Image (cartoon, helix red, strand yellow):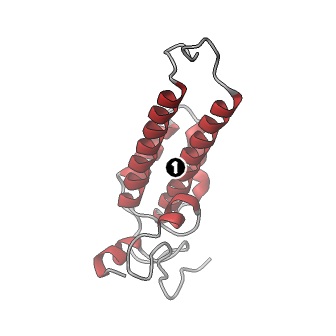
Amino acid sequence: MAPPTSGLIVGRTSGGGWDWKWLFFSFEGRAHRAHYWAVSAASILFAVICAIVFVAALDASIDGTARDGSSLSAGAALALLVVYALVVWAQLAVGVKRWHDRDKSGAWMFLAIVPFGSLWILVECGFLPGTDGPNQYGGDPRRAVATGY
């Protein structure tokens, strides 16, 4: 597939800011390192806040049983599963977009299931710059930051 001629920047709002819905849930386009770190920080913060609220709401002890002796309810377990799924989805979405920025397939996210593969994902997505200019996945997201587009 040839690079887009327009250099379209996916994920920008009309005011020039980030489109958060795209950033957290879409697998299309390119994301720069700031996107990656913002989603990672937001995901960790969201998971920690949900865990704190969950524990406070359950009034649970360390062994997972409530003070009245009842165990973790199915509804509470489902709520934790939903939170975990949202965090994993957001991390996968921004990771795929970072691989796109590096002009590679998002399938490289499968490295996460290989021993030490997550370390390579961290290096590629978190520290190495993306390709300059448009590539097969869209326009350069760094250009959008520099020009305010």
Q: Residue at x 47, y 83 (%)?
A: 7
The residue at the far bottom in this view is 6
Q: Residue at x 44, y 82 (%)?
A: 14
Foreground residue among 9 and 83: 83
Task: Examine the image and state in which quarter residue 16 appears.
Answer: bottom left
Residue 103 appears anywhere in the view:
no
Q: Residue at x 63, y 32 (%)?
A: 76
Q: Amino acid at mark 1?
A: Gln
Residue 96 appears anywhere in the view:
yes
Q: Residue at x 32, y 74 (%)?
A: 145
Quarter that holds the C terminus: bottom left
Q: Secondary structure at mark 1?
A: helix
The residue at the far left in this view is 146
Number of callouts: 1
Left or right relative to 45: residue 76: right
Left or right relative to 127: residue 117: right
Locate residue 60, reporting x and y percent: 52, 20
Locate residue 33, reporting x and y percent: 37, 58
Task: Examine the image and state in which quarter residue 48 appears.
Answer: top left
Quarter that holds the N terminus: bottom right
For residue 133, above or below residue 27: below
Task: Examine the image and state in which quarter residue 137 appears.
Answer: bottom right
Residue bearing mark 1: 91
Locate residue 97, reporting x and y percent: 51, 61
Locate residue 123, reporting x and y percent: 40, 46
For residue 43, above or below residue 14: above
Crowd tier of the residue under label 1, counting other residues whose Cα lies within 10 Å: few below 14, some 14–19, many 20 or above: many
The residue at the far front in this view is 68
Foreground residue among 133 and 9: 9
